[in-house]
Image: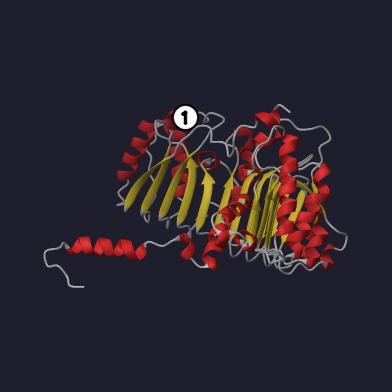
């Protein structure tokens, strides 16, 4: 075809682009379509079978199953909804061919009457060599406004894992009965474990590590039953402990994990925290409710920083003014390798004094992120001298400061803080303000009137 010299070249390019880039969904390869479907809840994946003949059986070949209770239609009563959901899962597993699974996720509000059903679903996933097994029996607080008396949690059949290839295990709100021969189970494929709202004794955790000799990631959240936890592992690389509750006394925690690179201790009431060997640690995160009575728990964790002075990334809250008056940390202690700091803080004189004390320990800091700090108690009173003390930040290597701010809150203090940064005699590459939004978060599903009023 001859080119028209009077035609706009950009118009030709746009037309050609439209004709060559428009692709029908059915023209995509089966592998790409299966990959797309793997991101959908299984109910929605099955619905796509109505698109055309090509899509009729595609859902059954998707290598992941996601039975999402929050995306399931709500019927007249809680009982009816759960009954239909259970039948839907049963029917799906019957119709699906026995092909290897990459992921099996289940969200369900459990009752004893469904025990056999859930057992069969779990064993189906394991028989089909599932790589990631994710069972969530909590979902959201809104599902537990009215708890039935005598309700029991699902008892996860841990021994069934012996015959599988599970690499990632996620369990939320269920009972865990470990077999007596845990050490002989040799779950070599298990790499990551995430437990939430599960009763775990000290011995159960240790036996879990023995049964999974290659475990690299362990995260325990809202777990209870532990009192004297001594973790010793050469394979563990990431450890997260969050919202621990002890029956009668505070938790004693001892860590001997030479290859651990990431550690998070969040809202843990520690009686004593002992670091034996964390020689590879890169990132350390710790936080607790900012209330005077919890400061002691925070201090017991933070005072161990001199044993991990090689870390490069620290996430912590600003209690450093109070810490500066305490013994327990060597006077010559510095975080020489620290490059990245995330600090939960306010901008009062008390906060600024604490921030200055922390920055004195970080001579090579390059990036600092400041998050809002929710204070339950007011700041401690300061002497007249400290109230009027000029603030100086030691930030010789700092390049970037990012402030996460809630629009309309503490505006004057933040403006004054930015002005203070500019007076420090250091040329920063940039100061970034990131707006956050407060308020009640949006629920993940529709109101549960039918369930609450049952």
Disc 1 packing (10 Å; few <14; some 14–19; many ≥20): few
Q: Residue at x 75, y 52 (%)?
A: 90
Q: Residue furthest bottom?
A: 1
Tell me residue 8's x, y (percent).
Answer: 16, 61
Indicate left or right for 39 with 101 as reference. Answer: left
Tell me residue 418's x, y (percent).
Answer: 34, 41
Say which quadrant the N terminus sits in.
bottom left
Q: Judge by depth and name the residue closer to the eye, 66 or 7.
A: 7
Indicate left or right for 348 with 165 as reference. Answer: left
Q: Residue at x 20, y 62 (%)?
A: 10
Q: Quadrant of residue 260?
A: bottom right
Say which quadrant the C terminus sits in.
top right
Q: Residue at x 56, y 58 (%)?
A: 37
Residue that mark 1 sits on: 383
Q: Residue furthest left?
A: 6
Q: Does residue 188 sit above or below 308 in this rendering? A: below
Q: Does residue 35 sit above or below 292 in this rendering? A: below
Tell me residue 190's x, y (percent).
Answer: 71, 65
Tell me residue 3's x, y (percent).
Answer: 17, 70
Q: Residue at x 36, y 31 (%)?
A: 412
Q: Judge by depth and name the residue closer to the eye, 148 or 312.
A: 148
Q: Which SS class for mark 1?
A: loop
Q: Residue furthest top?
A: 453
């Amino acid at each position: 075809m001859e080119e028209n010299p009077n035609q706009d070249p950009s118009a030709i390019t746009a037309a050609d682009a439209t004709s060559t880039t428009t692709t029908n969904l059915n023209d995509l390869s089966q592998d790409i379509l299966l990959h797309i479907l793997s991101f959908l809840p299984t109910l929605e994946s099955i619905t796509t079978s109505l698109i055309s003949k090509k899509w009729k059986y595609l859902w059954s070949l998707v290598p992941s199953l996601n039975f999402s209770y929050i995306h399931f239609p709500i019927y007249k009563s809680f009982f009816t909804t759960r009954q239909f959901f259970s039948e839907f899962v049963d029917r799906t597993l019957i119709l699906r061919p026995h092909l290897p699974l990459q992921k099996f996720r289940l969200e369900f509000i459990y009752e004893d009457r469904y025990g056999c059903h859930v057992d069969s679903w779990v064993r189906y996933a394991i028989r089909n060599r599932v790589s990631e097994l994710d069972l969530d029996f909590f979902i959201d607080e809104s599902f537990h406004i009215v708890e039935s008396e005598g309700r029991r949690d699902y008892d996860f059949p841990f021994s069934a894992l012996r015959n599988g290839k599970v690499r990632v295990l996620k369990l939320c709100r269920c009972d865990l009965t470990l077999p007596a021969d845990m050490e002989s189970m040799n779950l070599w494929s298990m790499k990551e474990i995430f437990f939430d709202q599960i009763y775990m004794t000290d011995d159960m955790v240790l036996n879990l590590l023995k049964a999974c000799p290659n475990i690299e990631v362990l995260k325990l959240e809202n777990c209870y039953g532990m009192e004297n936890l001594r973790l010793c592992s050469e394979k563990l690389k990431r450890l997260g402990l969050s919202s621990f509750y002890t029956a009668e006394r505070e938790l004693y925690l001892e860590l001997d994990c030479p290859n651990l690179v990431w550690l998070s201790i969040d809202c843990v009431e520690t009686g004593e925290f002992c670091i034996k060997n964390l020689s590879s640690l890169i990132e350390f995160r710790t936080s607790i409710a900012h209330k005077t009575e919890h400061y002691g728990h925070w201090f017991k964790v933070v005072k161990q920083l001199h044993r991990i002075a090689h870390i490069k990334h620290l996430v912590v809250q600003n209690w450093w003014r109070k810490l500066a008056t305490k013994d327990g940390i060597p006077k010559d202690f510095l975080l020489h390798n620290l490059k990245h700091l995330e600090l939960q803080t306010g901008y009062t004189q008390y906060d600024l004094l604490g921030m200055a004390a922390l920055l004195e320990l970080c001579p090579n800091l390059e990036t600092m992120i400041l998050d809002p700090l929710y204070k339950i108690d007011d700041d401690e009173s300061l002497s007249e001298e400290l109230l009027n003390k000029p603030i100086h930040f030691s930030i010789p290597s700092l390049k970037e400061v990012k402030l996460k701010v809630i629009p309309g809150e503490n505006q004057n203090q933040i403006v004054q803080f930015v002005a203070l940064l500019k007076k420090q005699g250091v040329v920063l590459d940039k100061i970034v303000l990131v707006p956050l939004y407060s308020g009640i978060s949006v629920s993940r599903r529709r109101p549960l009137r039918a369930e609450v009023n049952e």
